[in-house]
C-alpha cells in the first residue's frame, strides 16, 4: 500500500479501531504481540520531557519486553535514557483499537545498523537479527510459562538509511523481500502484516543510494501480501535524518494507521463480503483502474457523482453487500469507462466500509481497491 498519513483526517485510527471492534464483538480477549525493529529512527530520539502529561501516561495493559521482563511503556524502556521511539504512540493506538486485549511489544533497534551487515538472513543471520530473534524467543517463552496464549499480529520496520548511505541500495530489495519471508516463516505467520516507513530523502547522499532503497521499499510492499509502506518525508525532524518527539508520535500513529487498514480490510471481507477479484495488475492498468493496494482518494466531484447513480445500480450494490450490515451508503463514485469505483461506508460500524470496482455492463463487483478521502 502506498499512501501518506497526511491524506487522512486525524480520527483515522479511531475509525479503523471502531470498525475492527464492531466486526469482532463476539471475539474473546487475547494477547496480541507486535514486533518492532530497525535502526535509529525505530530506536527513537524523541525527548520524553517534551511530551504532555497525557502523552507521558503509560497506556493500561500495554507491555514492552525490556531487560528480560515485561515493563510499562516509558522513557528509556526501549530507547536511550529519557528518550522514546514510535512504540509509545503505537502502543496507545493498539490499546484503543483492541480495548479488550493485552498488548505486548517486542522491540530491537540500534542506530547505524544496515541490512547488508547487521540484519541480513544469510548463514544464520546478522548480529542484529540474532539479537532480535533471541529477545523475541525469550519474550515468547515468558508468556508461555505464564500460560498466556498469544498471537503475533504484525511487525513494524524502520530501516534502510545505512544501506543507502553506504552504497548498498542495489541489493536492498532482494534482501528486504527475503527478510520479510524469513520473519513470517520464523514466527509461523505466513500473512503477518509487515508495515514499513520509507526512509527520508536526506539519505540520498553521500553515495546516492537513497532512491534505490526508497524504490525497493515501495516495490516490495506492492509485491507482497499484507505489506504496506508509508511516506515519512513530512514527519517533524530534529536534524536532517531523525524525528523529534512530535515526529516520533506521528511515526507511531502512522504505523498504527497502516496496520489497522490492512487488518480492517481483511476483517470486512471475513464479515460476509466475498470478492472474487478478476482483474490482474496488467488488466487494471489497461482499464485505468487502481491496483489493489494503491490508494485512490475520493474528491468532491466523486461525492457528487455518487448521488447521480441510478437506483438500479444502488440496489444491485446493496444486494451484493448484504447481509454485511443493515445500512450501506455509497459515499463516492467515479466512472472509469465500463466500470465504477465505489467508496462504500457502513455507518453502523462507525464509518467502516469497503471500496469496490463495479462492472456497469455485468452489474456485479469485479474487484476491490484501497480508498480514502481527500481531507
Image: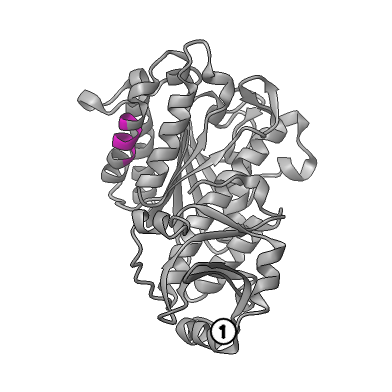
Q: Residues within 10 Å of mark 1 (few under 14, many from 20)?
A: some
Identify the residue at image location x=54%, y=66%. 20
Question: Which quadrant would residue 180 be assigned to in this image?
Answer: top left
Residue 251 spot, x, y in % from top left: 61, 39
Image: 253 above or below 356: above
The residue indicated by pointer 1 is 314
Q: Verify whether residue 67 appears in magenta.
A: no
The quadrant of the rendering that contains the C terminus is bottom right
Specify start and end residues of the magenta stretch as a single range: 174-180
- Can residue 73 be seen by looking at this rendering? no
The residue under the point 72% across, 35% down is: 246
From the image, give the main secondary structure of the stretch colored magenta.
helix
Residue lying furthest top: 206
Asked which quadrant contains residue 99, the reply is bottom right
User: Where's residue 121, x and y in %?
Assistant: 27, 29
Name of the residue lying farthest toward the front: 337
Amino acid at each position: 500500500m502506498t499512501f501518506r498519513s497526511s491524506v487522512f483526517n486525524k480520527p483515522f485510527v479511531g475509525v479503523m479501531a471502531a470498525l475492527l471492534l464492531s466486526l469482532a464483538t463476539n471475539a474473546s480477549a487475547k494477547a496480541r504481540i507486535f514486533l518492532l525493529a530497525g535502526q535509529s529512527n525505530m530506536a527513537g530520539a524523541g525527548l520524553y520531557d517534551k511530551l504532555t502529561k497525557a502523552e507521558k501516561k503509560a497506556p493500561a495493559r500495554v507491555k514492552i519486553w525490556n531487560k528480560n521482563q515485561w515493563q510499562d511503556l516509558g522513557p528509556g524502556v526501549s530507547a536511550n535514557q529519557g528518550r522514546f521511539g514510535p512504540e509509545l504512540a503505537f502502543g496507545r493506538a493498539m490499546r484503543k483499537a483492541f480495548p479488550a486485549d493485552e498488548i505486548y511489544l517486542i522491540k530491537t533497534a540500534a542506530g547505524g545498523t544496515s541490512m547488508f551487515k547487521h540484519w541480513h538472513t544469510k548463514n544464520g543471520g546478522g548480529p542484529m537479527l540474532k539479537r532480535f530473534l533471541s529477545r523475541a524467543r525469550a519474550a515468547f517463552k515468558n508468556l508461555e510459562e505464564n500460560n498466556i496464549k498469544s498471537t503475533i499480529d504484525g511487525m513494524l520496520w524502520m530501516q534502510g538509511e545505512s544501506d543507502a548511505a553506504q552504497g548498498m541500495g542495489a541489493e536492498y530489495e532482494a534482501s528486504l523481500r527475503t527478510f520479510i519471508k524469513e520473519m513470517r516463516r520464523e514466527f509461523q505467520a505466513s500473512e503477518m502484516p509487515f508495515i514499513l516507513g520509507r526512509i527520508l530523502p536526506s539519505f540520498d547522499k553521500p553515495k546516492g543510494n537513497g532512491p534505490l532503497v526508497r524504490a525497493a521499499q515501495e516495490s516490495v510492499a506492492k509485491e507482497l501480501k499484507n505489506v504496506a509502506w508509508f511516506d515519512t518525508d513530512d514527519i517533524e525532524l530534529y536534524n536532517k535524518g531523525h524525528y523529534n518527539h512530535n515526529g516520533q508520535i506521528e511515526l507511531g500513529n502512522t504505523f498504527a494507521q497502516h496496520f489497522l487498514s490492512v487488518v480492517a480490510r481483511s476483517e470486512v471481507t471475513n464479515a460476509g463480503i466475498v470478492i472474487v477479484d478478476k482483474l490482474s495488475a496488467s488488466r487494471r492498468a489497461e482499464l485505468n483502474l487502481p491496483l489493489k493496494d494503491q490508494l485512490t482518494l475520493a474528491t468532491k466531484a466523486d461525492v457528487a457523482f455518487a448521488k447521480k447513480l441510478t437506483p438500479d445500480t444502488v440496489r444491485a450494490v446493496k444486494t451484493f453487500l448484504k447481509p454485511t450490515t443493515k445500512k450501506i451508503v455509497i459515499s463516492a463514485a467515479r466512472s472509469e469507462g465500463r466500470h465504477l469505483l465505489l467508496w462504500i461506508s457502513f455507518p453502523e460500524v462507525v464509518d467502516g466500509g469497503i471500496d469496490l470496482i463495479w462492472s456497469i455492463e455485468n452489474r456485479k463487483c469485479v474487484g476491490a481497491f484501497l480508498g480514502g478521502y481527500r481531507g
